[in-house]
Amino acid sequence: MTRSGVRASVSATSLGREVRTVHAEIYEHPRTRFAASFLGDANFLRGRAEGDAVVVDGLGPVRTIASLGSGDTTLAVRPDKMRLAMPDESHDGNRIEGTVTQRVFSGTSVTYILATPAGPFRTFE
């Protein structure tokens, strides 16, 4: 019983759905660097927002899915949103060239660490 004398209950099923939805929203669209690093892995790129791209030293413009206005910003790039490709493969999005420096087998996945002009990057396969 609560202090006001009113009983409250929450269905475990509805609570589970709500928590999963909130976590997915924070994972996909974090509002702070802390939130992006708290839920899952992320590669961070500091740069200057210019409309629907962020200009990153060593990489040039990185397109974003929405306009960010203008000014200094940090992008969080999730390792699971990236894929490894050979230099001669075509692509329809952003491309970061790098060299694989480490490969870690984790049972169900492999983590790759890449050296890039913007610093180390992590991706999964």
Image: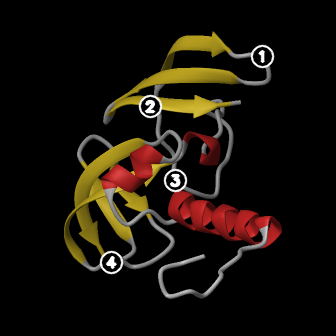
Q: Where is 95 relative to 115, above or below?
A: below
Q: Residue at x 60, y 87 (%)?
A: 6
Q: Nearer the viewer, mark 3 or mark 1?
A: 1
Marks 3 and 1 close (CB-CB < 8 Å)? no
Q: Residue at x 40, y 55 (%)?
A: 35
Q: Where is 4 relative to 10, above or below?
A: below
Q: Residue 11 or 19: which is nearer the viewer?
A: 11
Distance from Cα at disc 4 to Cα at disc 3: 16 Å
Q: Earlier in the sequence, mark 1 or mark 2?
A: 1
Residue 123 percent across, percent down from the top left:
57, 32
Q: Amino acid at mark 1?
A: Gly
Residue corresponding to mark 1: 107
Residue corresponding to mark 3: 94
**Of the numbered discs in the image, which one, if any, rests on residue 76?**
none
Q: Earlier in the sequence, mark 4 or mark 1?
A: 4
Residue corresponding to mark 2: 121
